[in-house]
Image (cartoon, rainbow, N blue to C red):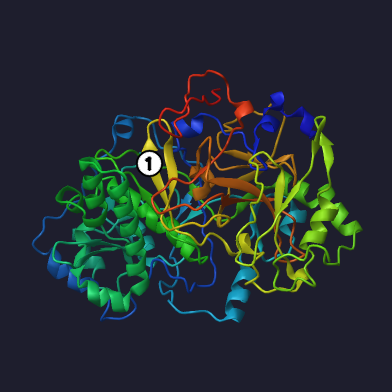
C-alpha cells in the first residue's frame, strides 16, 4: 500500500517522537478491552523479582496452613466486590482468544548470578517475535528466535504449577464478568485444604504485606487470601531476599505518593496497599485481589525473561475495573506484515551493500568501535529524502558508554532511529548499544489516573535522562486503506516501514499505558535492532526518558503535535491542571 493512500493522511500529521501514532480519545476513555495473552518459556533468570521459597525452613507446607484454617468457616462466595461499571453490566466478558491452563512446569527458579556465557546463551535464545500464519513457507522457517503459530492462545506463565492446579480443582472462582487473559479464574480456598493442602511441595509466594507486629503476611500463588500466613520478616530477608527487595520497591513508591499527595484518601490507599485492611483481608472476592493477580502474573512473564517488575494500582477508595488485555513481551506479527518485513526495500539495500566497515569519523560507544557497523549502516540506509514535499533529514540517536541516549538538540517531531549492534559488530551482550535487546529492566507501575485519562504509567524506580524504559509491543499489522478499527492504540513508523503499524488494543505490554502530555518526559524512538544478521528485520519501537524521572512521577509521551491538536473539541487535555489544549476527538 502506498503511504499516500492512508485515510485522511492523518497518520502523517501525528508523527511525534519519530514515530507515527494514531492514538485517539478512546485511550483516555477506556483501557479495559479484553485480549489474548501468551506464555514465553525461557531460561530461568538471575534477576529474580518474584522468588520462590525452596526449602522447608523458608516456606510452610500446606499441612501447616490446614491447622490455621480449622476454625474458619469455609467459603466459596462469588459475590465479587466489583466497581459499579462492571457490577451493573449484564454483558458477557469480551474474549478474544482462549485461555489455556495445563500442568505447568517446575516451580523452582534459582536466584543465582549467571555467568557471561549463560547470559549470552539465554539472550541468543530469547524470542524476537511471534508470527501468526497459515503460510507454509513462513511456518517452515527455522529461526529459533521467531515462534510461528496458527492461533494465538493465552497461557499461565511458565513456572506456576500451583496456579494451574487451582484452576482445575479450586473452589473459589472469580466473577466471570471480569475476564483476565492468561490468569487463573479459580483458586484454592479453605475447604480445599484437606484434599489439596497436604502436598509435599512448598508454597510459592505471590506477594507480601506488612502487619502491625513488624512481621509480613505471605500471600501464596493459587490460594485465596484466607490462606495467608504471618512470618518473620527477618527470616524472609535471609531466605527470600529478592522478594523483600521487590516489596521494598513497592513500599518506597507508595511512600513517595503519600508525600506528593498529602490527603487522607491517599493515606488510606497507601495503607491498604502495604498492610491490607480487615475488609480486603477477609474477602477473596474483593477486586483488590484482581490487581494483585495482574501484578504477579505479568511480572512472572517478565521474570521468565529477566525483566523488571510490574505493579498495577488503583489509589481510590472505590477501585475501578482493572485493565484487561493480553500480555506479551514481543510483537505478535501477522502473516502479511511478516512478509512485508522480509521484502522491504531496506532488506534489498542491506543485501546489495557490503556495509562491512566502521565509520572512522563516528565510531560511537560500541565495545568494539573499530568493527561496529551501526553508524556506517545508518548512513547507508537512512538518507535525506522528500516526503509530502517536506525534506526529511533522519537523526541517528546514539547511546553513550553508559547506555544512555544522546538527546542533544532533541526535537519531538524529528524523524530519528536508534541503531543497535548485531553479531556483525563483534561486541558482547554487555555492549552499550544493545539496550532494547536486553529488555525492560526498570520497575514500573500501571496506575489509575482519573476518569478522563484512565490508566497511566508511573516510575517505581528512578529513571535517568536517555535511559531505555520499555519497548512498545503489540500486534504488528499492515495499514489498509478504508479499514474500520480502533486506532487508539496504534503506533506507526516514519523511517523503518511506513506501511506497518503496532496496535496494542488487545495484545501488548506496559507501554500501552503511557499517557499523553503536551510537554512529555519520555519519547518513542524507532529502533533498528537485530541480534543476528540472519534474523528478520522487524521494526521496533523503544520508549526513552527525555529527562530524569523520580519515583512516583508520571511517565508520559506526546501522541500529538501541536499542529494536530484542534482549537476546540469535546475532549480537553488533562496532562496538567488547567492545560489549555484540546485533543482530537473522533
How many numbered circles are shown? 1
Residue 52, can we see it? Answer: no
Residue 463, can we see it? Answer: yes
State the residue at coordinates (89%, 63%): 354
State whether residue 367 is above or below residue 468. Answer: below
Q: Position of residue 250 (x, y in %)?
A: 34, 58
| Image-quadrant location for residue 207 | bottom left
Q: Is residue 561 left or right of residue 414?
A: left
State the residue at coordinates (29%, 32%): 84
Q: Is residue 474 left or right of residue 346?
A: left
Q: Which residue is mark 1?
A: 448
Q: Position of residue 73 (x, y in %)?
A: 11, 55
Looking at the picture, tell me which residue is in the foreground, 306 or 357.
Answer: 357
Q: Is residue 387 left or right of residue 65?
A: right
Q: Position of residue 178 (x, y in %)?
A: 36, 41
Q: Residue pushed farthest left?
A: 71
Quarter of the image for the C terminus: give it.
Answer: top right
State whether residue 518 is above or below residue 359. Answer: above
Q: Secondary structure at mark 1?
A: strand
Estimate how packed mark 1 is, as few (under 14), some (14 to 19) or many (20 or more) residues with alpha carbons within 10 Å: many
Quarter of the image for the N terminus: give it.
Answer: top right
Looking at the picture, tell me which residue is in the foreground, 189 or 336.
Answer: 336
Looking at the picture, tell me which residue is in the foreground, 362 or 247.
Answer: 362
State the residue at coordinates (25%, 81%): 57
Q: Position of residue 458 (x, y in %)?
A: 43, 48
Q: Residue pushed farthest front?
A: 409
Amino acid at each position: 500500500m502506498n503511504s499516500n493512500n492512508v485515510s485522511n493522511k492523518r497518520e502523517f500529521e501525528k508523527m511525534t517522537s519519530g514515530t507515527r501514532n494514531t492514538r485517539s480519545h478512546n485511550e483516555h476513555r477506556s483501557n479495559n478491552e479484553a485480549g489474548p495473552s501468551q506464555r514465553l518459556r525461557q531460561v530461568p533468570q538471575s534477576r529474580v523479582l518474584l522468588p520462590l521459597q525452596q526449602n522447608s525452613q523458608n516456606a510452610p507446607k500446606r499441612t501447616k496452613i490446614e491447622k490455621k484454617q480449622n476454625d474458619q468457616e469455609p467459603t466459596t462466595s462469588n459475590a465479587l466486590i466489583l466497581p459499579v461499571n462492571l457490577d451493573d453490566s449484564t454483558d458477557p466478558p469480551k474474549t478474544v482468544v482462549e485461555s489455556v491452563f495445563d500442568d505447568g512446569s517446575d516451580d523452582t527458579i534459582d536466584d543465582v548470578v549467571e555467568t557471561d556465557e549463560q547470559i549470552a546463551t539465554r539472550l541468543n535464545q530469547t524470542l524476537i517475535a511471534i508470527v501468526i500464519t497459515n503460510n507454509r513457507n513462513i511456518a517452515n522457517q527455522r529461526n529459533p528466535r521467531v515462534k510461528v503459530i496458527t492461533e494465538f492462545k493465552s497461557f499461565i506463565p511458565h513456572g506456576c504449577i500451583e496456579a494451574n492446579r487451582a484452576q482445575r480443582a479450586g473452589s473459589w472462582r472469580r466473577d466471570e464478568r471480569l475476564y483476565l487473559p492468561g490468569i487463573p479464574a479459580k483458586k484454592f480456598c479453605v475447604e480445599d485444604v484437606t484434599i489439596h493442602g497436604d502436598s509435599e511441595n512448598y508454597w510459592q509466594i505471590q506477594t507480601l504485606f506488612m502487619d502491625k507486629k513488624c512481621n509480613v503476611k505471605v500471600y501464596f500463588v493459587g490460594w485465596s487470601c484466607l490462606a495467608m500466613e504471618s512470618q518473620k520478616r527477618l527470616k524472609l530477608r535471609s531466605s527470600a531476599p529478592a522478594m523483600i527487595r521487590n516489596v521494598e520497591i513497592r513500599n518506597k513508591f507508595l511512600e513517595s505518593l503519600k508525600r506528593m499527595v498529602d490527603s487522607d484518601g491517599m493515606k488510606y490507599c497507601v495503607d491498604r496497599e502495604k498492610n491490607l485492611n480487615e475488609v480486603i483481608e477477609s474477602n477473596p472476592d474483593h477486586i483488590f485481589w484482581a490487581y494483585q493477580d495482574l501484578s504477579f502474573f505479568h511480572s512472572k512473564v517478565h521474570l521468565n525473561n529477566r525483566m523488571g517488575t510490574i505493579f498495577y494500582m488503583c489509589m481510590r477508595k472505590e477501585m475501578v475495573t482493572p485493565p484487561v488485555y493480553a500480555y506479551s513481551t514481543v510483537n505478535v506479527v501477522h502473516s502479511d506484515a511478516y512478509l512485508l518485513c522480509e521484502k522491504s526495500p531496506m532488506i534489498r539495500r542491506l543485501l546489495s551493500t557490503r556495509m562491512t566497515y566502521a565509520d572512522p569519523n563516528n565510531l560511537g560507544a560500541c565495545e568494539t568501535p573499530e568493527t561496529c557497523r551501526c553508524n556506517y549502516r545508518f548512513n547507508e540506509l537512512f538518507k535525506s529524502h522528500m516526503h509530502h514535499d517536506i525534506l526529511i533529514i533522519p537523526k541517528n540517536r546514539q547511546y553513550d558508554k553508559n547506555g544512555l541516549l544522546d538527546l542533544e538538540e532533541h526535537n519531538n517531531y524529528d524523524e530519528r532511529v536508534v541503531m543497535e549492534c548485531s553479531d556483525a559488530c563483534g561486541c558482547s551482550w554487555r555492549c552499550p548499544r544493545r539496550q532494547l535487546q536486553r529488555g525492560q529492566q526498570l520497575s514500573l507501575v500501571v496506575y489509575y489516573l482519573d476518569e478522563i485519562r484512565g490508566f497511566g504509567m508511573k516510575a517505581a524506580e528512578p529513571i535517568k535522562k536517555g535511559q531505555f524504559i520499555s519497548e512498545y509491543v503489540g500486534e504488528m499489522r499492515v495499514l489498509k486503506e478504508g479499514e474500520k478499527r480502533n486506532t487508539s492504540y496504534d503506533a506507526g513508523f516514519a523511517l523503518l516501514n511506513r506501511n506497518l503499524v503496532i496496535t496494542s488494543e488487545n495484545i501488548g505490554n506496559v507501554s500501552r499505558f503511557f499517557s499523553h502530555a503536551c510537554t512529555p518526559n519520555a519519547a518513542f524512538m524507532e529502533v533498528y535492532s537485530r541480534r543476528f544478521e540472519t534474523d528478520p528485520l522487524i521494526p521496533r519501537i523503544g520508549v526513552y526518558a527525555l529527562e530524569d524521572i523520580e519515583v512516583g512521577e508520571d511517565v508520559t509521551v506526546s501522541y500529538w503535535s501541536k499542529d494536530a491538536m484542534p482549537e476546540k473539541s469535546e475532549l480537553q487535555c488533562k496532562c496538567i491542571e488547567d492545560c489549555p489544549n484540546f485533543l482530537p476527538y473522533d
